[in-house]
Image: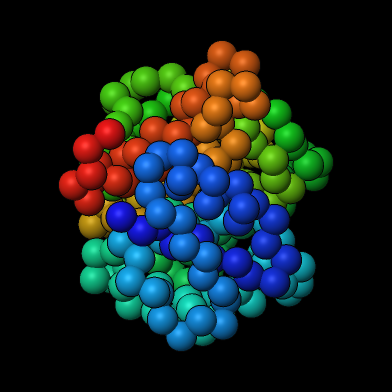
Amino acid sequence: MKIGVVTFPGSLDDGDARRAAGLAGAEAVQLWHADADLKGVDAVVLPGGFSYGDYLRCGAIARFSPVMEKIIDAANGGLPVLGICNGFQVLCEAHLLPGALLRNSHLHFRNRDQKLKVENTSTAWTSGYTEGQEIVIPVKNGEGCYQADEHTLDALEAEGRVVMRYLDGNPNGSQRDIAGIRNEAGNVVGLMPHPEHATEALTGPFGGGVDGLVMFTSVLASLGVKA
């Protein structure tokens, strides 16, 4: 199975995301922002970083990259798509997910190991966890404050579309401690923490070294690949 990882001008964590896909057992495929096709991949990751330097608004320019036209069409057709940090922002800008990510409420960059609660395991990316499981995945963001109107937040809660929530301290002021959400179909997930940085015991966070790898093995399992 092939997992494509998009590199935008300014992307930072694309290499780490490709490594994570490989550790999970997938063939990692590099996708360039100007590509006009998805090279036959079975899933796509929009990595963290600073696409286009995050000029204008985080993800607002990346959303108009040629490869995003293909990803939007494929996601609407059921392709599993994961947006991490800046990738989460791109998914919101592309209207594949509702809401927006604003500057952290305390106005400071946050970089730390973060405890999370898994709220929903019905997605292609979270099926390997158990509901209510507590995991540790690093966060590193300056604009990770999830915001949406009350109607949208109530709908996300009622439909089980909050996939992960911050525990033991909200690092950025996100409404209702939301760390990640999914679309209605469950194939598109946006997550502010970085699972690609929690895939190996030696370099992963204390107390949860490989918790992030489960997101990548989950999508392979959803595609029929046995671990």
Q: As drawn, is 197 to the left or to the right of 150? A: right
Q: Residue furthest top?
A: 207
On the question of residue 179 being in view, the answer is: no
Q: Residue at x 31, y 39 (%)?
A: 218
On the question of residue 143 being in view, the answer is: yes
On the image, which quarter does residue 197 sit in? top right
In the picture shown, does residue 226 fall above or below 65?
A: above
Q: Residue at x 23, y 44 (%)?
A: 225
Q: As drawn, is 210 to the left or to the right of 217? A: right
In the picture shown, does residue 189 fall above or below 140?
A: below
**Colour scheme:** rainbow
Q: As drawn, is 63 to the left or to the right of 13? A: left
On the image, which quarter does residue 3 sit in? bottom left
For the N terminus, give its image quadrant: bottom left
In the picture shown, does residue 215 fall above or below 10?
A: above
For the C terminus, give its image quadrant: top left
Residue 137 rendering spot, x and y as whole percentages: 56, 30
Q: Residue at x 45, y 34 (%)?
A: 213
Residue 180 rendering spot, x and y as whole percentages: 46, 43
Q: As drawn, is 204 to the left or to the right of 157? A: right
Total numbered badges shown on the rendered structure = 0
